Amino acid sequence: MDINQIKVVKRTVKYPRLELKTGRPLLILPQKGHFDPEKIIKKHESWLRKKLEYIEQIKRKYSNEKIYRRLKEELMTIIERWVRKYSQILGVKPEKITIRLMKTRWGSCSRKKRLSFNLLLKYLPSSLIKYVVFHEMAHLIVPNHRRNFWQLIKQEFNNPDHYEEALFGYWFLLLGKLGSLGKLESL
Ligand SMILES: [Zn+2]
């Protein structure tokens, strides 16, 4: 990927940031204030190149992985089953579970203990769906990604890096298949 392909957009953010998970690198700039996109890109160029190289490598590695076909209802059944199991193991319960299309992540956990899961999980192997459920359930106990969090994850998945990498790989595999996330229905 060419560093010159970075798209610059303005949004209501406080600080400039780089986003790499939407298929094309984005430099997001605050609407207010003066920021020189070229300067920002130059400053972070080596970091950016490393990240983009890593993405290319992961894309190649996962390019032939199987894409599963499930209905949203089937995904919900799978998620609910794992939520029940992990509620017993972890001793916590979510207030609400929602499935919706998310553009930058597989799942999220709100402060009100509401879990959201990406509809795109329906295309993933069940082992990865299971991991994402446990990951989000673990956030009901530890909201961040610091050491305690990974210790908790390791009680159930002794190699979380493997799952995180596979989720990253599937993310870009699906993006490639879809062209853009907007084309979800055509898959
Ligand atoms: Zn997390």
Image (spheres, rainbow, N blue to C red):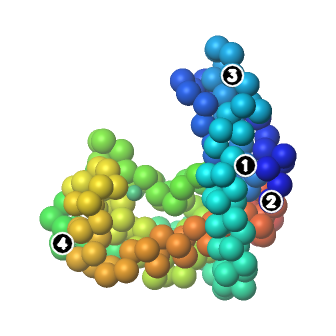
Label 4 environment density (alpha carbons within 10 Å; few <14, some 14–19, many ≥20)? few
Q: Earlier along the polypeptide chain: callout 2 or callout 1? A: 2
Vertical position of residue 108 compared to residue 137: above or below: above
Q: CA distance from mark 2 to mark 4?
A: 45 Å
What secondary structure is found at the residue carrying circle 1? loop
Name the foreground residue: 35 vs 118.
35
Q: Is residue 31 left or right of residue 6?
A: left
In the image, residue 137 lies at what x, y percent?
Answer: 31, 62
Quadrant of residue 156 within the rendered picture: bottom left
Q: CA distance from mark 2 to mark 1?
A: 9 Å
Q: CA distance from mark 1 to mark 4?
A: 41 Å
Q: Earlier along the polypeptide chain: callout 3 or callout 4? A: 3
**What type is the residue that disc 3 sits on?**
Phe
Q: Is residue 150 left or right of residue 30?
A: left
Q: CA distance from mark 2 to mark 3?
A: 24 Å
Q: CA distance from mark 1 to mark 3?
A: 17 Å
In the image, residue 57 lies at what x, y percent?
Answer: 68, 74
What secondary structure is found at the residue carrying circle 3? loop
Q: Earlier along the polypeptide chain: callout 2 or callout 3? A: 2
Which residue position is annotated with label 4?
88
Disc sitting over residue 1 in the figure: 2
Quadrant of residue 26 within the rendered picture: top right
Tag in front: 1 or 3: 3
Q: Quadrant of ligand 1?
A: bottom left
- Would the CB of label 3 be found within 8 Å of ligand 1? no
Disc sitting over residue 25 in the figure: 1
**What type is the residue that disc 1 sits on?**
Pro
In the image, residue 61 lies at what x, y percent?
Answer: 67, 81
Q: Earlier along the polypeptide chain: callout 2 or callout 4? A: 2
Q: Is residue 79 visible?
A: no
Query: Image point 19% across, 67% down: which residue?
Result: 90
